[in-house]
Image (tube, rainbow, N blue to C red):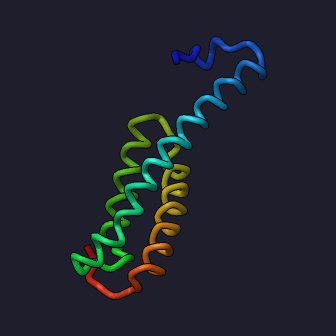
Amino acid sequence: MTRPAPDTIRSMADLRVCIDQIDSELVALLAERERYTDRAPDLKAREGIAARAPSRVDAVLANVRDKALASGLDPELAQAMWRIMIETVIAREERVIGKAGVDG
């Protein structure tokens, strides 16, 4: 569905409809992302990779920052949101595979 440009919207009710649509799309994408990260513990265990891989975290955050800047999104906001996701995923992985392994 095509949304009107933000600067053409004339009421908060119409603006909220657009924001709610975007939220629905974001939730669907985040759910898809989570399904992929749910696969990580098995693969990391098989490959001897630790749940917490600082070099990978740094790379993901740098990539998110670059994409945010290119898209006009506040890079600090983007990185903060990704840090929450990353830490949640790592905690889940550590419950499954522990903390052993190499930084991968």
Q: Is residue 91 left or right of residue 17?
A: left
Instruction: Name the residue located 72 percent from the left edge and 27 percent from the top edge.
Output: 16
Which of the 4 quarters of the picture holds residue 69?
top left
Q: How many marks?
A: 0
Residue 41 is situated, as x and y percent measured from the top left of the image, at 36, 72
**Front-lying residue, 98 or 85:** 98
Residue 67 is situated, as x and y percent measured from the top left of the image, at 38, 43
Q: Is residue 56 left or right of residue 91?
A: left
Q: Is residue 2 above or below residue 72?
A: above
Q: Is residue 29 left or right of residue 20?
A: left
Instruction: Name the residue located 44 percent from the left edge and 43 percent from the top edge.
Output: 68
Residue 92 is situated, as x and y percent measured from the top left of the image, at 49, 73
Which of the 4 quarters of the picture holds residue 17?
top right
User: Furthest residue to the left?
Assistant: 47
Q: Is residue 9 above or below residue 73?
A: above
Instruction: Name the residue located 53 percent from the left edge and 40 percent from the top edge.
Output: 26
Residue 85 is situated, as x and y percent measured from the top left of the image, at 51, 60
Q: Is residue 67 left or right of residue 13?
A: left
Q: Quadrant of the C terminus?
A: bottom left
